[in-house]
Image: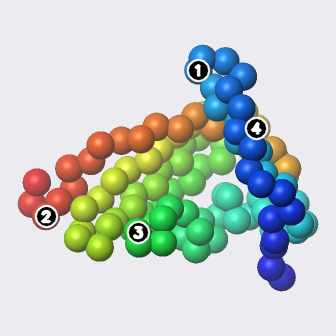
Amino acid sequence: MSAETTSATSMTLPSDREILIERVFDAPRRLVFDALTRPEHVARWYGPRALTLASCEIDLRVGGAWRYIVRDPAGNEFGFSGEYRGHQQLGTAAADFYATPLNLEKGR
C-alpha cells in the first residue's frame, strides 16, 4: 500500500519555542504512524536523498527518546534526537527535536 500527499505541508509558530508542522496523507493512520515510529520505515524516508540513515533508535514511551544519525557521501555523520513529551498514539505524536553536532569521523 502506498501513501500519497493530499496537501502541502503547513508550518506555524504557536509560540517562540514551538514549531507545528502538519501534513495530510491519503493513507490509513496505522501506515502513517508506523512510517514515523518504526526504524525500518524511517530509514526509507528520513533526510535528503544523498544521506543514509546510519542509526535509528526509537523509544515511544513518555519520556522516551529518539535518535537518528545520518551519513553523507563523504562519511560525515550528523545526529538528531529528541524526547517524546506525551503518550504516542495512533494519529498523534509530540516530541522535542534537537540537532546534535557530532564528531563521529573516523578516529575522532
Mark 2 surroundings: few (<14), some (14-19) or many (≥20) residues within 10 A: few
Mark 2 to mark 3 CA distance (whole Å): 17 Å
Q: Note whether residue 39 is visible.
A: no
Mark 1 surroundings: few (<14), some (14-19) or many (≥20) residues within 10 A: few
* Amino acid at circle 4: His
In this rendering, the label closer to the viewer, 4 or 1: 1
In this rendering, the label closer to the viewer, 2 or 3: 3
Where residue 6 appears, as percent x and y from the top left, is 86, 62
Q: Which residue is at 50% across, 57% downward?
A: 57
Mark 3 surroundings: few (<14), some (14-19) or many (≥20) residues within 10 A: some
Residue topped by disc 3: 51
Residue 25 as seen in the image, left or right of residue 56:
right
Mark 2 to mark 1 CA distance (whole Å): 35 Å
Give the mark nearest the N terminus, 2 or 1: 1
Residue topped by disc 1: 17
* Amino acid at circle 3: Leu
Give the mark nearest the N terminus, 4 or 1: 1
Give the mark nearest the N terminus, 2 or 3: 3
At mark 1, the secondary structure is: loop
* Amino acid at circle 2: Lys
In this rendering, the label closer to the viewer, 3 or 4: 3
Where residue 42 appears, as percent x and y from the top left, is 59, 65
Mark 4 and mark 2 residues within 8 Å of each other at the beta carbon? no
Q: Which mark is residue 71?
A: none
Q: Which residue is at 53% across, 48% downward?
A: 66
Residue topped by disc 4: 87
Residue topped by disc 2: 106
Give the mark nearest the N terminus, 4 or 2: 4
Mark 3 and mark 1 residues within 8 Å of each other at the beta carbon? no
Q: Nearer the viewer, residue 15 or 107?
A: 15
At mark 3, the secondary structure is: loop
